[in-house]
Image (cartoon, rainbow, N blue to C red):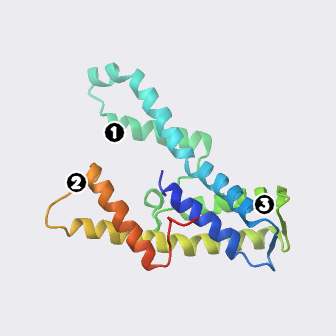
Amino acid sequence: MLIAKEFVAYLSRQLANRLDSNIIEISNPAAVAELINTIVLDELTVEDRLNDEVRDLLEQYSVYMSNNGISYSEMFRRIKNQLVAQRKIVRASGRDTGDAMKLSRDKINEISHKLVAGLRKSRDCRLRKDVNDVRLELVKVVSEILLNEDKADKAARQKIRTLKKEVPEGTEEWDILHKRYYADELKSYGIDLSHG
């Protein structure tokens, strides 16, 4: 997943706490945070589920691909792009859409629409402004929070690159170092994922 589940939980709690009471009245912040968490996680795993589906498809055609000299990565990209277009999936990664942030603007907008729909149905809150005003506020707060997450991720990656010993990305050592440096960087922004 593009963003760690722990960070999504933090983001959800922040949204439930930071949304202005002039925009939305929240009677049960914990329930609203859980609703937000569920919606955001579901949206962020759409592409993960699609990747799994493409891998399953390619497994069936591995002999054909090797007999015809077709590269796995090229075929993976082609099939995924075709399914993304057919199903009208909004890509989550900012890298795929040319956005500077890790999560694309389009994905943040899509998530905001789903959040507003979920919040409107919830008995734990009441929208006090127009639906689009609430959605725009969600986009603003999510973008602010993700900006710090992105800075922390980039700083953690930079720390790993500057180590005397080269640590290849994807290794267990890299993952452990990234997790530690990432948590340290988040704390420098006042974000502590270890607290609920």
Task: Name the residue rendered at 76%, 71% in the picture.
Answer: 134
Report if residue 106 is visible in the image: no
54 on left or right of 19: left
Give whichever of 114, 119 is nearer the camera: 119
Q: Which mark is residue 65?
A: none
17 on left or right of 95: right
Give whichever of 165, 51 is nearer the camera: 165
Amino acid under disc 1: Ser
User: Seen from this angle, which residue lies furthest left?
Assistant: 164
What secondary structure is marked by label 2?
Answer: loop
Report if residue 136 is visible in the image: yes
- Residue labelled with disc 1: 73
Residue 127 location in percent, x, y?
84, 69
Q: Image quadrant of residue 137?
A: bottom right
Q: Residues within 10 Å of mark 1 (few under 14, many from 20)?
A: few
Q: Which mark is residue 168?
A: 2
Q: CA distance from mark 1 to mark 3?
A: 40 Å
